[in-house]
Image (spheres, rainbow, N blue to C red):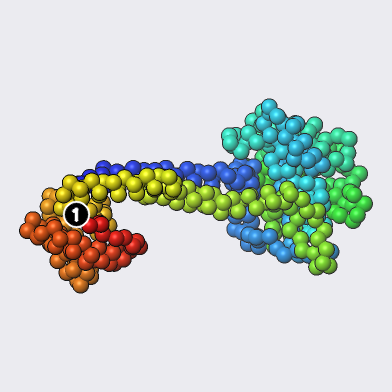
Amino acid sequence: MSEQSQDNASGNSAPLIILAVVVIAGLALMYFSSSSSRIDRSAIGTDGLAIWLRDQGMDVLNTAPEEIVGQKTPILRILPLYDTDLTVGPREAEELEQGSPRATLRNLSLAAFRSKIESADTLVILPKWRSDMITSGTADPDVLIPPGQMTIFGLWRGPTVAAAGDGFVQAPVTKDLTEETLADEAALYAPRVLSDIVDDACMPLLSLAGRGTLLARCDDLWGEGRSFYLLSDPDLVDNHGLANGDNADIAVAMIAPLAAGRPVYIDTTTYANITDTSGQDPRTRSLADLGRFFEYPFSLFWIGIVIASGLALWRGSRRFGAPVGEASALDMASKARTITASARLLRLAGSERDLVSAYIRARMETLDGIVLGAARRPMPANEIAGEIIRRVSHRVPETGKRLAEAYGQLAGDGPETHQRLAALIPFEEAFQETLDAFGHASRPSRPADR
């Protein structure tokens, strides 16, 4: 009977190390999988604005409110833009930005934008920084979007904004109608103001003293009655700008009158979350909509599925090994002929005793792997049969008793050959019952031919 070696102790640490590496990689992938969430937490994001407004007693919604087509939602939507031109499609934007830092970060479509501003009063915040700012977090001329690229709505033949200074500029923010100053002074790096080409369509509300318009109300740009508030410089409200000068106080003084007691919702989505109660869906459906199911937070679900599947496959390969293919009919026939020939040669040679001994050894080796298992303690070969019978007797006493009696008649040197062969039938029955008792399906078999 062959001895089975133990290698579990030396290999215990390897699965733990592999599992730790997989978990760490999965967490890193989850962190970097969502570009949208990454933007919101970065210097140019607006996570800090939501916290600050709540601290000032304003109601800020965490989730998108229910919106219905044709009805004005009672909120102030704050909509930060991260695209230089909403009329450019995703593929066109990628072609324009090849080989350079990205200036289009979310690919919000003009149709979705117009749906958003129609369903609720909206404060639109124009972009200012390229993708470099997300990773560096440092204000620098090289990471500014050139004003010439800021066409945004595709309405005017020229940029929507104009540069109003270099480096950090500190200047008061005043109301255009009353010339009242908000808080103290705003501190903006390379400030942006609305260009002159928007003056005919937008009414100035707030100005950076002596430099131009910061906030305006734009009415009916597309001749459909849509209006919205337009902020030229995002550093008044983004994570980077709120820490500079009195920008945080100015942001509250600017947003509070626009909200007029209504909840504030900072909208970072790229689609219109609007329900059509008329029975018709106003949105155009396409295969591209499926991509939303792979965006954050759905991406976390798919990452979890991949990690769980990988762990299951890895553990299965370690536990059960490579798949064992079924033997072909030709192989089975060849083995059967070999076994029959070997048995006949042993009988002709008068070696029936050896034939029975070989059969018993094979059966007990099978029970060794099933009853004792690979983790059994090392023991001499002559003690293994006794340990097998002891464990079988502990679980199924009747079967253990019959197995012990039959094995004693077969393994001893005393019994005659005909007695040993007669004991094969009760031994085989006890063997099959043992397989069933230890959770292995028994297969019908017949003792060796006489």
Which residue is at the front of the view, 36 or 19? 19
* Res 106 quadrant in image: top right
Q: How many marks?
A: 1
The furthest residue to the bottom: 398
Q: Which residue is mark 1?
A: 356
Secondary element under disc 1, as helix, strand or loop, is: helix
Whether residue 54 can be seen here = yes
- Which residue occupies 87% across, 47% down? 202
Residue 142 x %, y %: 67, 28
**Left or right placement of residue 327 versus residue 136 in this view:** left
- Which residue occupies 85% across, 54% down? 227
Which residue is at the front of the view, 380 or 297? 380
The image shows residue 375, relative to residue 425, as above or below, that is above
Whether residue 249 can be seen here = no
Question: Which quadrant of the rendered structure holds the C terminus?
Answer: bottom left
* Res 82 quadrant in image: top right
Residue 11 x %, y %: 29, 43
- Which residue occupies 68% across, 49% down? 291
Estimate how packed mark 1 is, as few (under 14), some (14 to 19) or many (20 or more) residues with alpha carbons within 10 Å: many
Residue 80 x %, y %: 71, 47
**Left or right placement of residue 400 versus residue 205 in this view:** left
Which residue is at the front of the view, 122 or 277? 277
- Which residue occupies 72% across, 51% down? 289
Which residue is at the front of the view, 367 or 252? 367
Q: Three-letter amino acid code at disc 1? A: Val
* Res 420 quadrant in image: bottom left
Residue 313 x %, y %: 45, 48
**Left or right placement of residue 301 versus residue 205 in this view:** left
